[in-house]
Image: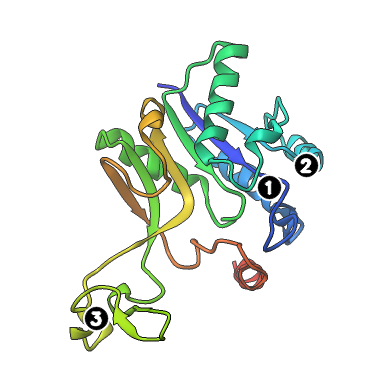
């Protein structure tokens, strides 16, 4: 069983420029992603995919296996994650005759992932014979209380009847995807068009702090606070 860890780190980002090179302590988000992969006991190997020379140099210095620069056509704002995954997997197959059974996507923007998260997701995937496993967390706000607003500012419940719940603890227990780990059987790639649940997808629950995903500067400030405390 060949289990591939795949660290994806594009150079461009709109909300926070060069966000994969942000630092927590003296380590970049790229360093921390590679560190989590190295901590895993179940990944067979890990490969690093980027379109950026500076990020590539940092990854190699951190000990990552980064044998190529990602082609520009797979590094656009509208490039799908799955085209990037397919490129990396096919590169290994063509150049090293290495066949991938399971892919585990690791994003640098979730810096509080540990090797134990990776291994727990892989164990669920294998033991349950699931199609995929993703990390999830409890939502910041119950979706049953969310509303939609039309052009006339009229509000309606997002979930019909959701306003019948008067207290948060009365709402059904739900989870939202967290970006720490996405593990899936590679032979299912052709039937996938999203990282969100598909087929027989199982969830690995992580804490709100572990699930911090750096998409904005506010998220980065929050991550720095949590990093200092831990």
Q: Which residue lies most toward the front here?
A: 152
Residues under labels 2 and 1: Cα distance?
A: 8 Å
Q: Which of 18 and 119 is in front in this view?
A: 18
Q: Name the residue under label 2.
A: 58
Q: In this view, does 171 lie above or below 215?
A: below
Q: Could you say whether the residue bearing mark 1 is in a helix, strand or loop? A: helix
The answer to whether residue 40 is seen in the rendering is: no
Task: Categorize mark 1 by other alpha carbons within 10 Å: few (<14), some (14-19), many (20+).
Answer: many
Task: Categorize mark 2 by other alpha carbons within 10 Å: few (<14), some (14-19), many (20+).
Answer: some
Residue 195 in picture, x, y percent from top left? 43, 46
Mark 3 or mark 2, which is nearer the start of the sequence?
2
Residue 199 in picture, x, y percent from top left? 27, 40
Q: Which of 20 and 59 is in front in this view?
A: 20
Residue 53 in picture, x, y percent from top left? 80, 38
Q: Contact, CB < 8 Å: mark 1 with mark 3? A: no
The answer to whether residue 164 is seen in the rendering is: yes
Residues under labels 2 and 3: Cα distance?
A: 45 Å
Q: In this view, does 153 lie above or below 26?
A: below
Label disc, if present, on residue 21 of the rendered structure: none
Q: Quadrant of residue 140?
A: bottom left
The structure residue drawn at horizontal position 51% and vertical position 45%, both measured from the top left corner, is 115
Q: Is residue 100 above or below residue 132?
A: above
Q: Name the residue under label 3.
A: 169
Mark 1 or mark 2, which is nearer the start of the sequence?
1
Task: Categorize mark 3 by other alpha carbons within 10 Å: few (<14), some (14-19), many (20+).
Answer: few
Q: Contact, CB < 8 Å: mark 2 with mark 1? A: yes
Residues under labels 1 and 3: Cα distance?
A: 38 Å
Q: Nearer the viewer, residue 208 or 197?
A: 197
Quadrant housing the C terminus = bottom right
The answer to whether residue 173 is left or right of residue 63 is: left
Label disc, if present, on residue 30 of the rendered structure: 1
Q: Could you say whether the residue bearing mark 3 is in a helix, strand or loop? A: helix
């Amino acid at each position: 069983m060949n289990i591939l860890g795949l660290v994806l780190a594009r150079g461009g980002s709109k909300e926070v420029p060069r966000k994969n090179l942000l630092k927590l302590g003296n380590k970049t988000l790229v360093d921390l992603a590679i560190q989590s992969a190295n901590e895993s006991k179940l990944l067979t190997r890990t490969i690093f995919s980027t379109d950026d020379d500076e990020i590539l140099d940092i990854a190699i210095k951190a000990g990552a296996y980064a044998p190529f620069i990602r082609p520009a056509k797979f590094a656009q704002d509208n490039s799908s994650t799955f085209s990037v995954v397919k490129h990396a997997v096919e590169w290994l197959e063509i150049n090293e005759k290495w066949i991938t059974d399971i892919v585990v996507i690791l994003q640098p923007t979730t810096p509080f992932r540990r090797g134990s998260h990776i291994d727990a997701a892989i164990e669920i995937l294998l033991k349950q014979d699931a199609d995929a496993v993703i990390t999830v967390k409890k939502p910041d706000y119950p979706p049953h209380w969310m509303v939609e607003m039309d052009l006339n500012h009229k509000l309606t419940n997002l979930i019909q009847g959701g306003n019948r719940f008067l207290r948060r603890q009365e709402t059904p227990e739900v989870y939202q995807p967290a970006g720490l780990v996405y593990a899936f059987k590679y032979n299912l790639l052709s039937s996938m068009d999203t990282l969100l649940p598909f087929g027989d997808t199982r969830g690995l629950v992580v804490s709100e702090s572990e699930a911090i995903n750096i998409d904005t500067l506010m998220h980065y400030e929050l991550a720095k606070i949590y990093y200092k405390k831990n």
